[in-house]
Amino acid sequence: MNFQQLRSVREAARRGYNLTEVANALFTSQPGVSRQIRELEEELGIDIFERSGKRLTGLTDPGKEVLHIVERLLLEAENLQRAGETYSGKTTGTLSIAATHTQTRYVLPRAVQHFRTAFPDVRIALQQSAPEHIAEWVLSGKADIGIATEGLSRFEGLVSFPCYEWHHVIVVPNDHPLLKAKSVTLEHLAEHPLITYDVGFTGRSHIDEAFSTQGLAPDIVLTAMDSDVIQQYVALGLGVGIVASMAVDYLPANLLAIPANHLFAPNVTRVAVRRGAFMREYAIDFIQQLAPKLQLGELAEAVSWRR
């Protein structure tokens, strides 16, 4: 039994049993992957995968249990390496952070600036995507830390902590009639075409819930992942924007923001790590920059490091 065999099994399950993709991910050949899997099956005396001819089609019942063990073994192998680097005093490496565009654009710059000062020999790799992809990347080890408003708390393999609370803000051109209202209501908004985030992004669920609760059907004419894109189309006069409050710190001169705290429920951005992962000192420092109220003991209960 060796780690290459274990990695072949793990990647086969992760990549939909496509051995070509597994081979590319492991920098080997497809026959090599097949051989590694078959040798492990022979050693264990079971079939890990179901097959149709030479093609893998799924996991057998024993294979499902084996996969859980394989995941734990490979995670602990990674933890062992990180522990060695930590206790040997090594402070170099790469911190991989997966986040949505809004977090990367508006929230992370200060934390990254602090981090670069504190750990000048550590490189940062920023990855941007949807919350579900962020969760998958952290679970797979592709990212060390995930940051998003929606979705991260739903994955059993992740442990997530609240970073900060924020609200949505209405954005309109500086001559828009909504600016004359003493207090904008959902009914007012429903009278205009709206531009906001894609479903599953940046608190969009709270926007939908607010309108639904009032029995209103908003005319959402355009959606995007990017706050800057939303503001651009608002500036073109295509609709009223609903964006994250942190985005209006960079509002163009021809747009104005209207508070919407009274209309939509507050949102909580969360930071997530893989449950059971050994966290390097610099990763812990970065998390604490994002979630300063988080106690080290809370993090220690969820991940396998000790100070």
Image (cartoon, rainbow, N blue to C red):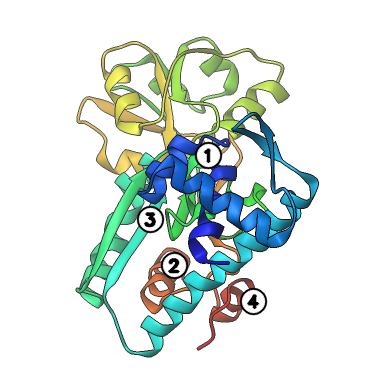
Q: Is residue 4 above or below residue 276?
A: above
- Residue density around tag 2, few if under 14, some if 14–19, many if 20 or more, within 10 Å: many
Describe the element under mark 4 as helix, strand or loop: helix
Image position, residue 294 (x, y; %): 54, 72
Residue that appears at 55% across and 61% down: 274
Query: Answer yes or no: do the residues labelled 1 and 2 have beta carbons within 8 Å?
Result: no
Q: Is residue 64 visible?
A: yes
Q: CA distance from mark 1 to mark 2?
A: 30 Å
Q: Nearer the viewer, mark 1 or mark 2?
A: 1
Image position, residue 201 (x, y; %): 50, 34
- In the drawing, what numbered circle is on residue 287? 2
Q: CA distance from mark 4 to mark 3?
A: 22 Å
Residue that appears at 44% across and 67% down: 287
Image position, residue 96 (x, y; %): 36, 58
Q: CA distance from mark 3 to mark 1?
A: 22 Å
Describe the element under mark 3 as helix, strand or loop: strand
Describe the element under mark 1 as helix, strand or loop: loop
Q: Looking at numbered disc 3 in the image, what kind of residue is underneath it?
A: Ile
The numbered mark, 2 or 3, whose residue comes first in the sequence reads 3
Q: Nearer the viewer, mark 2 or mark 3?
A: 3
The numbered mark, 2 or 4, whose residue comes first in the sequence reads 2
- In the drawing, what numbered circle is on residue 15? 1
Query: Answer yes or no: do the residues labelled 3 and 1 have beta carbons within 8 Å?
Result: no
- In the drawing, what numbered circle is on residue 97? 3
Q: Nearer the viewer, residue 205 or 264?
A: 205
Q: Nearer the viewer, mark 4 or mark 1?
A: 1
The numbered mark, 4 or 1, whose residue comes first in the sequence reads 1
